[in-house]
Amino acid sequence: MPSFAAFASRIFDGLECGGFHAAYYRVLEAFAHGNIRRLIVTVPPQHGKSLGATTLLPAYILGLNPDLCIAIASYSASLANRFNRRVQRIMDMSVYGDMFPETSIKRLGARSDYVRTADTVEVVGHAGELLSVGREGSLTGNRVDVCILDDLYKDAMEANSPVVRDNCWEWYTSVVRTRLHNGSRELIVFTRWHEEDLIGRILDKEPYEMLTSWSQLDRTADDKWLVLNFEAVKRSPPSEIDPRSEGEPLWGERHSAALLKERMKLDPFRFECMYQGHPSAAQGLLYGNRFATYGTLPDVPLRRANYTDTADTGDDYLCSVCYAVDSRRFIYVTDVVYSREGMDVTEGLVASMLEGQPGCEVLVESNNGGRGFARAVSRLCPNHRVTWFCQSANKEARILSNASAVGRNIIMPEGWMRMWPEFAHDIVTYRRQFRSNRWHDAPDVLTGIIEREINGMLDKKIRALGFGSR
């Protein structure tokens, strides 16, 4: 009996089954053999998601057991039927017959009592069949042993519609679930579109665990979902299933890190959802993309300044923001350094940025190496006033309580998301639920700027350090 990867390679000569595809196919094989009953896999667009799960997998499962009834569902009947026809073409191939001689379907044009249409095909001599249905279509009268749901939302407009999401949930609970029995298996394979899409609702209501090790394939409880998320750009910790290093693309041969970075620049919020598998409802974002932008600075800014927060740990970003303040107390961001490099590198990056910001008053948080960083930058920039202070207030309380002022008073340059994509990403996708965020560095610095320039919380500390009052 061929492995799923070997089967795929024989069906499609030259098919790439290395890298993440090898892990993806190994998980699908465990599902095909019944080791997993409930599986959710999220994959970025154009990474071979449907080829593996909705084209190759049904043919492979019927080869293993021709008595199973498999249902494929997608956002439209035409797309689901297209998957069905692709599976049928595979099962017509002579190489398929060589691997699975007990599984065959009615030949096109041949006389037979067995059914073969665009949406239904029966296995000759067995009880198995393959059904396809669009979202909100009927499965009445059909038992379903294996259910495969592939992209139940056509696009962002559908996924952002509460009516469509509610209808999808109603269809899933009242149609799909009612066709399943004790031994049924479910596979949901999506590109994520919204926090409250079908996957989001399921994970909010039913037990699940993230798939990170191969041993989980042998011990997942029948009532628990196993969830595997392939990020387009690796940000989560490496695991047995996805051992990539941080920043490494999922399928670099097809979608390079540079290409993915360009896509993130276009829409960081959508990129985090579709490509990273981490959707956030817009109402759950702290800032979103609500910042005003400017083309040119005011003729006579009140003053120029910089706020720098060195990395708290080796995993954090150094965030250094230069800005100008006008007479109305609007704050114009002029340049940013946002880096996870060591201080031996970031000292030079910040110093180079400051050289292009004449007369800039530099304030550095000294909590974690900031004092030494400030001294190093001061040596590199002798014409700038550089000092440090200790930030003792609670970070979560500071960020959340100053969020409105950040959105109201800070103005970004036109094209800022393209200029500083990682900084922009961590700002516009930052969530109100503090612990849902991995990095707080960019919001922390914008908050510090507001505290310094708008609400006066840092006035005493700044005056004590020798900076003039505003």
Image: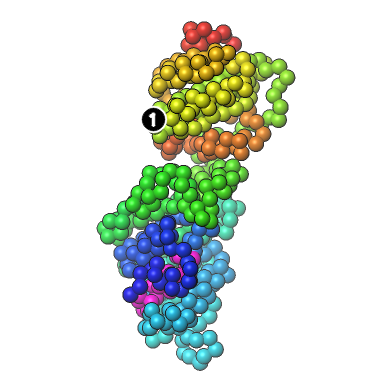
Can residue 446 be spotted in the picture? no
Write the residue at 62% across / 26% down.
334
Q: Look at the image and tell me in which quarter the N terminus lies.
A: bottom left
Tell me which corner region of the image, top left, top right, bottom left or bottom right, holds residue 130.
bottom left
Residue 53 on the magenta span: yes
Q: Of helix, strand and loop, which mostly describes the magenta segment?
A: helix
Q: Which residues are magenta?
A: 51-67
Write the residue at 63% across / 17% down.
358
**Relative to 24, 361 lies left or right:** right
Q: Nearer the viewer, residue 163 or 315?
A: 315
Q: What residue did someone put label 1 on? A: 313
Callout 1: 10 Å neighbours few (<14), some, many (20+)?
Answer: few
Write the residue at 43% across / 30% down.
342
Q: Look at the image and tell me in which quarter the C terminus lies.
A: top right
- Asked which secondary structure carries label 1, the reply is loop
Image coordinates for residue 456, horizontal then vertical, percent: 53, 14
Can residue 52 be spotted in the picture? yes
Q: Is residue 450 above or below residue 425?
A: above
Q: Nearer the viewer, residue 283 or 175?
A: 283
Image coordinates for residue 318, horizontal then vertical, percent: 47, 28
Write the residue at 71% across / 17% down.
300
Residue found farthest to the left: 219
Q: Nearer the viewer, residue 296 or 201?
A: 296
Residue found farthest to the bottom: 111
The amino acid pointed to by label 1 is Thr
Q: Nearer the viewer, residue 256 or 288?
A: 256
Residue 407 on the magenta span: no
Image coordinates for residue 101, horizontal then vertical, percent: 38, 83
